[in-house]
Image (cartoon, rainbow, N blue to C red):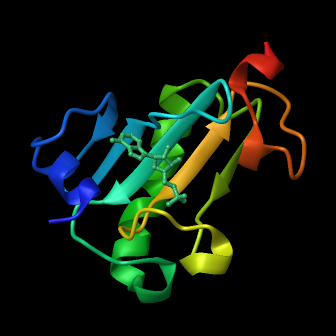
Amino acid sequence: MCLFCKIVEKEIPANIELENEDCLAFHDINPKAPIHILVIPKKHIDSFNDIDPETMAKLTPFMQDVAKQLGIDQTGYRVITNVGSDGGQEVKHLHFHILGGAKLQWGHFTDADPREYL
Ligand code: AMP
């Protein structure tokens, strides 16, 4: 079972922000911005290459709800999904990064220390 499937099964603890039947949002363990959430489908999908329209249709409003719940929907945020080795994907379970809580610099997020924003 992959790392994020273990989080879905609650075999590994995570700081969960929002959950429903199909989707899970939890705080990234190594945040790159003051707010850094990972949103995943509960069913295992390797990457964005393999996502089906039905799952995407569930993830989209869920991600919007996460942004609203965190109060960043009006101030703005960034949604990223890394795909494969050139994309820098480390965990092979599809996840969308939601980054916000500060004015993000383009290109800064990969090596960012969230304290630099405060
Ligand atoms: P990626 O490089 O796009 O595959 O992103 C994987 C992300 O998962 C990284 O930002 C990690 O900090 C994060 N991560 C890895 N393990 C955990 C964990 N146990 N709980 C929360 N986030 C994690």
- Residue at the far top: name it: 118
Q: Residue at x 48, y 63 (%)?
A: 90
Asked if residue 73 lies left or right of residue 93, the reply is right
Q: Examine the rendered structure and indicate whether residue 82 appears above or below residue 65.
A: below
**Residue 81 spot, x, y in % from top left:** 58, 64
Q: Examine the rendered structure and indicate whether residue 52 appears above or below residue 42.
A: below
Which image quadrant is residue 4 in?
A: bottom left
**Residue 39 spot, x, y in % from top left:** 42, 51
> Which quarter of the image is occupied by the N terminus?
bottom left
Q: Residue at x 84, y 44 (%)?
A: 108
**Residue 28 spot, x, y in % from top left:** 47, 37
Q: Residue at x 49, y 78 (%)?
A: 48
Which image quadrant is residue 57 in?
A: bottom left
Q: Residue at x 28, y 33 (%)?
A: 14
Asked if residue 112 lies left or right of residue 93, the reply is right
Asked if residue 111 lies left or right of residue 6, the reply is right
Q: Examine the rendered structure and indicate whether residue 82 appears above or below residue 32.
A: below
Q: Nearer the viewer, residue 18 or 47?
A: 47
Asked if residue 26 lies left or right of residue 33, the reply is left
Q: Nearer the viewer, residue 115 or 94?
A: 115
